[in-house]
Amino acid sequence: MSYRERIAFAMFKTSYPDNIAANMSLESMPVTRTRIDAHLVQEVDTRLDWGKKRDRYLKLADAALLEIDALAHEADQNRQGRKQ
């Protein structure tokens, strides 16, 4: 898995409660069940949810990586005594 996809998946997992996110990986994606009332249970297949939202999270990861790259470039310039 690329850094880009790892970052995207980490961001995706934040949309789930900690106890569910802790058990999520691309190899093991649970179906979550939430009781709505005495007769209804909501099920969410997190694998399908990831498939549907993957591109959006990859775009966010791209933005994060570009910003990290810019920060690293600025830090290198500051270490060399140059200012922008």
Image (cartoon, grey):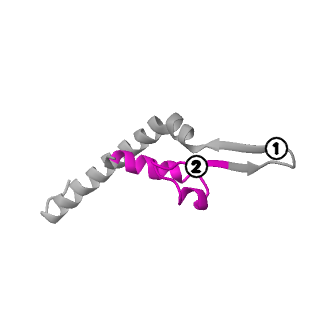
Q: Secondary structure at mark 1?
A: loop
Q: Nearer the viewer, residue 38 or 59?
A: 38
Q: Residue at x 47, y 52 (%)?
A: 25
Q: Residue at x 77, y 45 (%)?
A: 41
Residue indicated by mark 1? 40
Specify the segment rendered in magenta: 4-32
Q: Residue 74, percent across and down?
A: 23, 56
Q: Nearer the viewer, residue 62 or 54?
A: 54
Please indicate whether residue 79 sits to the left or right of residue 7 in the image: left
What is the quadrant of residue 17 in the picture? bottom right
Please indicate whether residue 24 sits to the left or right of residue 32 in the image: left
Structural distance between the alpha carbons of marks 1 and 2: 19 Å
Q: Amino acid at mark 2?
A: Pro
Q: Which mark is residue 30?
A: 2
Q: Secondary structure at mark 2?
A: loop
What is the quadrant of residue 82 in the picture? bottom left
Determine if the magenta segment contains residue 21.
yes
Please indicate whether residue 73 sits to the left or right of residue 35 in the image: left
Q: Residue at x 53, y 34 (%)?
A: 52
